[in-house]
Image (tube, rainbow, N blue to C red):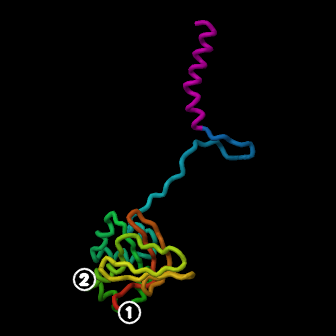
């Protein structure tokens, strides 16, 4: 082959390889000390279902155990969406002496109390002033209210709101919503 043929074959090979090399390089400005790296998309954080999110939250262990004991964990594994008004562990510790043991010994009562904390659909607090009533899984009407400083579900302060899950949302509250209270 004549030198001219080698030149054409070499140029053709570069044209075939060059696009792949260029795509995997990042332009480096002179002031950066960072090495060249491949352009990779930012990892997308995958949302977990409500129960898994509650476990990961850290202070909702009592609620997660009680949901399993009551059988409501099966409901929350469904696609939803659901809203869980989640009393934290300190809310259960604040119950009257013996109340938690009483609930645990009566599966129907436990299920009724925990059903008050679940709403089918997304109940979100939007804006500084809100006053809305939603229907709980147990059929009770639950009042959600907010002012410029705080948001409440019934008498419980919403301490952490809008924790997104793959099948709904969690609002962490500071009290257990017992029927007939306040």
The reply to whether callout 1 and callout 2 are in contact (CB within 8 Å) is no
Residue 108 occupies quadrant: bottom left
Q: Is residue 138 left or right of residue 56?
A: left
Q: CA distance from mark 1 to mark 2?
A: 19 Å
Q: Which residue is mark 1?
A: 96
Was residue 74 drawn as part of the magenta stretch in this picture? no
Residue 136 in the image, given as x and y percentages of width and height: 34, 78
Mark 1 and mark 2 lie on one chain; the one further toward the N terminus is 1
Residue 170 disc label = none
Q: Residue at x 42, y 69 (%)?
A: 169
Dot 2, crowdedness within 10 Å: few (<14), some or many (≥20)? few
Q: Which residue is mark 2?
A: 108
Residue 140 in the image, given as x and y percentages of width and height: 32, 82
| Magenta-colored span | 1-24
- Callout 2: SS: helix
Residue 66 occupies quadrant: bottom left
Most common secondary structure along the magenta stretch: helix
Q: Quadrant of the N terminus?
A: top right
Q: Residue at x 39, y 74 (%)?
A: 84
Was residue 8 drawn as part of the magenta stretch in this picture? yes
């Amino acid at each position: 082959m004549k030198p001219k043929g080698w030149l054409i074959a070499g140029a053709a090979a570069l044209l075939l390889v060059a696009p792949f090399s260029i795509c995997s390089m990042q332009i480096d400005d002179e002031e950066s000390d960072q090495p060249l790296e491949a352009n990779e998309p930012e990892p997308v954080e995958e949302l977990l279902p409500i129960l898994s999110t509650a476990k990961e939250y850290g202070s909702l262990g009592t609620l997660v155990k009680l949901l399993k004991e009551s059988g409501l964990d099966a409901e929350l594994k469904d696609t939803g969406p659901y809203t869980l008004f989640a009393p934290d562990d300190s809310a259960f510790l604040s119950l009257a002496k013996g109340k938690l043991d009483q609930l645990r010994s009566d599966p129907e009562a436990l299920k009724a109390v925990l059903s008050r904390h679940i709403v089918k659909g997304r109940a979100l607090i939007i804006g500084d002033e809100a006053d809305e009533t939603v229907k709980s899984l147990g059929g009770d009407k639950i009042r959600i209210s907010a002012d410029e400083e705080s948001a409440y579900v019934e008498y419980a302060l919403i301490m952490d709101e809008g924790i997104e899950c793959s099948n709904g949302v969690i609002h962490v509250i500071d009290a257990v919503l017992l029927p007939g209270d306040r």
